[in-house]
Image (spheres, grey):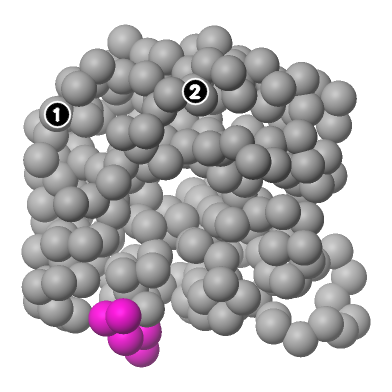
Amino acid sequence: MRKPIIAGNWKMFKLISDAVATATALKPLVANANHCEVVIAPPFTALKAVADRLEGSNIHVSAQDLAPEIKHGAHTGEVCGDMIKDAGCSHVIIGHSERRAMYGDTDAVVNRKIRAALHFGLTPIVCIGETLDERDAGNAEKVVATQLAQSLAELTASEVIRIVLAYEPVWAIGTGRTATPEQAQQMHAFIRQWIAQQFDATAASDLRILYGGSVKPENISDLMRAADIDGALVGGASLEAESFSRIVNYEW
Ligand code: 13P
């Protein structure tokens, strides 16, 4: 059985004090959530303080990116995977559409970052998803298949099982326009089938595929009822402990 994951991506929000306050407020609100894994991804500067505050709790801490390199060196501005682990993280988001659109994270870069994360024993949460133009042109599955092929290039099935995928249609991010459970399910089923073809049946059935894009307390339950949706990657609605805890504690 695939254990669901509810992950909150705080993006470039929150100073350390606010991040720690939100994490502190979240802790008791999700303490009984044994049905899923809970992950929050604060900005780099707050990782250590948040992880320290959450030590011994059921909330995992994730970074939002990492360097593709695995050796320390002259890479100004980059953060190596072992530094992320050292700060108390177990997960790292890779290839978010905002990084792809604004910071040049190509599929080839995403592939290197996945390898770096796996090298350091971090769980990569790898984001894929089409733009509205691509969907309207009928190319959504083709775009996602290309992202998968290039991002997961030359990984083994046992490596792929250690990854979490997040299908985040770009047109649903921060727009309030959630994919319908049917639209999301259709793409998740396509992704799982693609994994089965390219890797193997075990990798496909074990792989967790999260949905992201305007997930709210009001729509999480319908999304989670879809057979191939194994959790959510939540942006805006994860910034407040109360709304994020309602998503974590969805009815199921
Ligand atoms: P929103 O939930 O704000 O649409 O953001 C989704 C997202 O980008 C999560 O990574």
On screen, residue 180 versus residue 114, left or right, reads left
Is residue 157 within the magenta segment? yes
Q: Position of residue 166 (x, y in %)?
A: 37, 49
Residue at point 73%, 71% (across, down): 82
Q: Is residue 14 visible?
A: no
- State the separation of the CA atoms marked 2 and 1: 20 Å
Which labelled disc corresponds to residue 133? none
Position of 227 with respect to 199 (left or right) is left
Q: Nearer the viewer, residue 106 or 5?
A: 5
Horizontally, residue 181 falls left or right of residue 19, namely left
Q: Main secondary structure of the magenta part?
A: loop
Q: Amino acid at mark 1?
A: Arg
Assess whether residue 41 is covered by the magenta stretch: no
Packing grade of label 1 (10 A; few <14, some 14-19, many >=20) is some
Residue hosting label 2:
30
Q: Residue at x 83, y 82 (%)?
A: 72
Q: Earlier in the sequence, mark 2 or mark 1?
A: 2
- Amino acid carrying label 2: it is Val
**Residue to which mark 1 is pinned:** 225
Residue drawn at x 71%, y 22% as measured from the top left: 24
Secondary element at tag 2: loop
Query: Which quarter shows the C terminus?
Result: top left
**Residue 239 left/right relative to 33:** right
Q: Which residues are magenta?
A: 153-158
In the rendered view, would you say 10 is above or below 5?
above
Q: Is residue 127 visible?
A: yes
**Residue 164 x %, y %:** 38, 58
